[in-house]
Amino acid sequence: MPWWGTLLGGTLGYMFGGPLGALLGAALGRNFDRGIKLTDEQGAFGTGQQERVQAAFFTTTFSVMGHIAKADGKVTPEEISATESIMGRMQLNALQRKAAIKLFNEGKKDGFPLHDVLQQFRQECMRRRNLVQMFLEIQIATAMADGHLHTSEKRILYTIGEQLGFDHAEIEHLFSFSGGGPSSGGTRRAPLSNAYQILGIEKTASDAEVKKAYRRLMSQHHPDKLIAKGLPEEMIKLATEKTQQIKAAYEQITASRRHQH
């Protein structure tokens, strides 16, 4: 967890300002009030930028979780359990877990600057769309983990997705992952129709189209690629579960097609 060590060492504080810096500072009892240019003119990684992306992902993930959980006016025990499940799967150490809980509580507060938080998060991630998509998938899966998605929660999830650059159809597709997303393990067997939804294809798709969709999604969710783009190492298990879910859907479809011949 190099980014966490850099953060605690104080170096990151001089590079990480804005609303995310304020949230992380509140969670750690630090004052991150200074910032520097995030990238060079070409948008390439600058010194420490990888750590900033990882810190931004961690901070945004748990604070937005809290905001979504409070969307219907109250945070249920099931929603708290879903968030704790994510923390458990990430194997956070004691300090990280404490920070995650504080970030969740910051997100629950009235006046949480959702728009500003998402704007900085998107800026930090630059053009790493797969990384941003992983963030949105985690939010959707956590919100749906208790089996109940309040209208206000779904409305906020669409707002979040749209601000991060996803259109309505793309967000709708991401909801198809909720049956086995990061918060539920990712490998339980579902109806064949769900398998097609996970791959984002119709039942009429050709075998070649099925394979193409499978390879594209596996590439998007490859843990090593996401880590390289800035996914905190602690979240690698969540990314791995996504690839397992995609693989299970693909195998379910191919097996059903073999039986038809």
Image: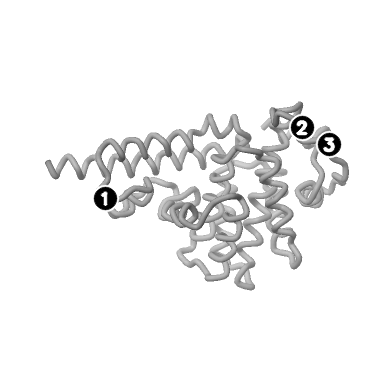
Residue type (three-letter) at the residue carrying disc 2: Thr
Per the image, the residue denoted by label 3 is: 36
Judged from this view, the residue extending furthest toward the left is 261
- How many discs mark residues in the rendered view? 3
Looking at the image, is mark 1 or mark 2 earlier in the sequence? 2
- Looking at the image, residue 195 lies above or below residue 5: below
- Callout 2–callout 3 Cβ contact below 8 Å: no
- Callout 1–callout 3 Cβ contact below 8 Å: no
Residue 150: horizontal and vertical position, in percent? 53, 70
Q: Nearer the viewer, residue 109 or 97?
A: 109
Residue 260: horizontal and vertical position, in percent? 14, 44
Which mark identifies residue 6?
2
Element carrying mark 1: loop
Q: Residues within 10 Å of mark 1 (few under 14, many from 20)?
A: few
Separation of marks 1 and 3 at Cα, in angstroms: 50 Å
Residue type (three-letter) at the residue carrying disc 1: Lys
Q: Residues within 10 Å of mark 2 (few under 14, many from 20)?
A: some
**Colour mode of the rendering:** one colour
Q: Is residue 86 left or right of residue 208?
A: right
Residue 19: horizontal and vertical position, in percent? 78, 51
- Looking at the image, residue 101 lies above or below residue 43: below
Element carrying mark 3: loop
Per the image, the residue denoted by label 1 is: 203
Q: Nearer the viewer, residue 127 or 2?
A: 127
Which mark identifies residue 253?
none
Looking at the image, is mark 1 or mark 3 earlier in the sequence? 3
